Amino acid sequence: MSDHEVLHVQGRVLVGPEDVRDELWCVDGRITFERPPGEALTVTGWVLPGLVDAHCHVGLDRHGPVDAGTAEKQALTDRDAGTLLIRDAGSPSDTRWIDDREDLPKVIRAGRHIARTRRYIRNYAHEIEPADLVAYVGREARRGDGWVKLVGDWIDREAGDLTACWPRPEVEAAIAEAHRLGARVTAHCFAEDSLRDLVEAGIDCVEHATGLTEDTVPLFAERGVAIVPTLVNIATFPHLADGGQEKFPRWSAHMRRLHARRYDTVRAAHDAGVPVFVGTDAGGSLAHGLVAEEVEELTRAGIPAIDALSATTWRARAWLGRPALEEGAPADLVVYDEDPRADVRVLAAPRRIVVNGRITG
């Protein structure tokens, strides 16, 4: 399409779970429901707003930061899977150049991970001690797009298991500083121990959240703290546990327990009213483009299909402060052959992908 072509999208336009329109137009990269004059290229099918991956890492692989060419391939892979809005949950690379590309997903950055010294994956994070936490949170709050990412727990080699990384007073002060600067805070958490302190300190979201229990689920629900379960990543826990069995048997057993109850954990959170959103954790050791698999995993956990779909579309966009299929919104949408509300597996086979009003796939 040229810059001046108009795109007519016709069929079943899912403005919301039950709000279905017959058509929309993409004019100058924006959505309108008013017919413009002149001719238009027509695309037909079932239409969703561009999917959201709320835990993704563009510019990162298993070894650390990657070059721009590799980051571009990562972003294109996500785009071609229908992911048109990414919350980048920690990256050591500068990916601001993506904002100038009209053919790539839109990215909301959380800056670089903030971790305890020698308590995270090498080359990923700022590795600091608690006395520096407030300063680093302030720095990343200013650099990011309204989010900051902490590493809330990780293996403690002396304990031989997952333990919390930060003392409560420092966490409280750091989250208060982020909020003062207008940023929300999320944290990587696998285990149980760090969750209560983080939530009571005012955290906004927890990634993975495999350590939720019947004691902490109500606390999350009461405070409105969201979780992004990344079940396609949690599926790797048995393999990780096997690799650490000889050196860290307590940690390995713990990881297997967290994996075994992963679906029960997510379902209990959802049933209690905890906001649950789709995220794949792509970009570390996981491939990009797994958003459809993660939605299907949420349904395997017992979350109703319409809620799992909303967790990567309408509700996810509202949570991140970005529009969906609204008048004047950026024309980012995905077209499918069948109704994804009836079967979320439809998400794995987009017919057309439209970014800023242009067909890219």
Image (spheres, helix red, strand yellow):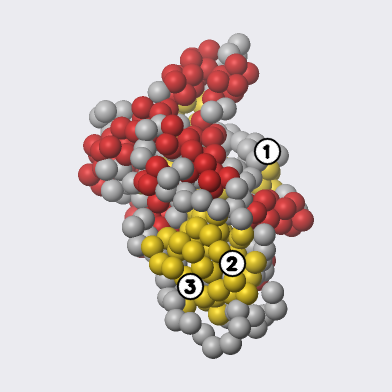
Q: Nearer the viewer, residue 37 or 348?
A: 37
Report which residue position mark 2 lands on: 43
Q: Nearer the viewer, residue 107 or 342?
A: 342
Judged from the image, the secondary structure of the residue bearing numbered disc 3 is strand
| Relative image position of residue 191 (x, y in whole percent) | 42, 29
| Relative image position of residue 338 (x, y in whole percent) | 51, 51
- Crowd band around label 2 with a 10 angstrom C-alpha radius: few (<14), some (14–19), many (20+): some
Whole-number angstrom distance, CA of label 3 to CA of label 1: 41 Å
Task: Determine the residue positioned at 46% across, 43% down.
Answer: 343
Residue type, mark 3 in image: Leu
Residue type, mark 2 in image: Val
| Relative image position of residue 262 (x, y in whole percent) | 42, 27
- Label 1 or label 2, whichever comes before in sequence order: 2
Give the quadrant of residue 235: top right
Report which residue position mark 3 lands on: 24
Q: Nearer the viewer, residue 80 or 214?
A: 80
Residue type, mark 1 in image: Arg
Number of marks present in the image shown: 3
Q: Quadrant of the C terminus?
A: bottom right
Whole-number angstrom distance, CA of label 2 to CA of label 3: 10 Å
Q: Quadrant of the N terminus?
A: bottom right
Task: Determine the residue positioned at 44% across, 68% down.
Answer: 22
Give the quadrant of residue 308: top left
- Label 2 or label 3, whichever comes before in sequence order: 3
Tell me, yes or no, if residue 217 can be seen here: yes
Whole-number angstrom distance, CA of label 1 to CA of label 2: 39 Å
Residue contact at pointers 1 and 2, CB within 8 angstroms: no
| Relative image position of residue 328 (x, y in whole percent) | 46, 77
Judged from the image, the secondary structure of the residue bearing numbered disc 2 is strand
Report which residue position mark 1 lands on: 62
Task: Determine the residue positioned at 48% across, 72% down.
Answer: 24
